[in-house]
């Protein structure tokens, strides 16, 4: 059954929206893009999402509905953010990261990477371990 989208879209001052971006207005509430935010080409912002001030989102990123991105965050290209996710202020998401639904990402200035996204140190340790295991099994 089709549900009418009756909410609003609020775009702050100085926001830049790239080509082929899609910003869904709120289903019942508001979708908010904070002041000074920059959206690269082909970014999708879902219903009732909230993007803080001075956020940068690179191309081909999808932000699912009812998610919240705090102020001063950096989101790399091709990042997928599930529904009801909270990205706290100042977090950095590396390209092609995946954030599972209903998760919270914390850490001002901390880089997160991978799917599911985790701090980059943890992610790189896992890659190194996997590489060692692959070399050992090839002997």
Image (tube, grey):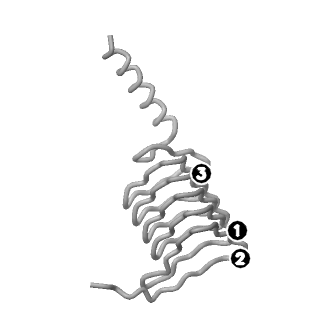
- Residue at screen point 57% across, 68% down: 20
Q: Which mark is residue 36?
A: 1
Question: 10 Å neighbourhood of mark 2: few (<14), some, or many (≥20)?
Answer: few
Sequence order check: which comes first, mark 1 or mark 3?
1
Q: Which mark is residue 108?
A: 3
Which image quarter: residue 137?
top left
| Marks 1 and 2 close (CB-CB < 8 Å) | yes
| Marks 3 and 2 close (CB-CB < 8 Å) | no
Which image quarter: residue 51?
bottom right
Q: What element carries label 3?
A: loop
- Residue at screen point 45% across, 56% down: 80
Question: Which residue appears farthest toward the top when viewing the image?
Answer: 139
Q: What element carries label 1?
A: loop
Q: Mark 2 points at which residue?
A: 13
| In this view, the mark in front (1 or 3) | 1
Question: Which residue appears farthest toward the front when viewing the image?
Answer: 20
Q: In this view, does 55 lie above or below 137?
A: below
Q: Position of residue 48 (x, y in %)?
A: 47, 76
Question: Which residue appears farthest toward the left when viewing the image?
Answer: 1
Which image quarter: residue 70?
bottom right
Q: Where is residue 133 in the image (x, y as percent from the top left)?
A: 35, 21
- Residue at screen point 37% across, 61% down: 102
* 35 displayed left or right of 10: right
Q: How far apart are marks 1 and 3 (CA)?
A: 19 Å
Question: 10 Å neighbourhood of mark 3: few (<14), some, or many (≥20)?
Answer: some
Could you tell me which quadrant the C terminus lies in? top left
Q: Distance between the residues labelled 1 and 2?
A: 6 Å
Could you tell me which quadrant the N terminus lies in? bottom left
């Amino acid at each position: 059954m089709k549900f009418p989208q009756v909410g609003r879209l609020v775009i702050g001052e100085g926001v830049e929206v790239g080509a082929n971006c899609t910003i869904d207005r709120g289903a019942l509430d508001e979708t908010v893009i904070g002041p000074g935010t920059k959206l690269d080409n082909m970014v999708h912002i879902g219903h009732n999402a909230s993007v803080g001030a001075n956020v940068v989102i690179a191309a081909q990123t999808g932000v699912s509905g009812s998610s919240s991105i705090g102020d001063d965050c950096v989101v790399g290209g091709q990042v997928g953010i599930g529904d009801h996710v909270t990205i706290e202020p100042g977090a950095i998401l590396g390209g092609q990261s995946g954030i599972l639904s209903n998760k919270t990402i914390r850490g001002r200035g901390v880089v997160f990477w991978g799917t599911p996204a985790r701090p980059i140190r943890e992610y790189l340790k896992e890659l190194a371990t996997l590489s060692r295991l692959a070399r050992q099994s090839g002997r």
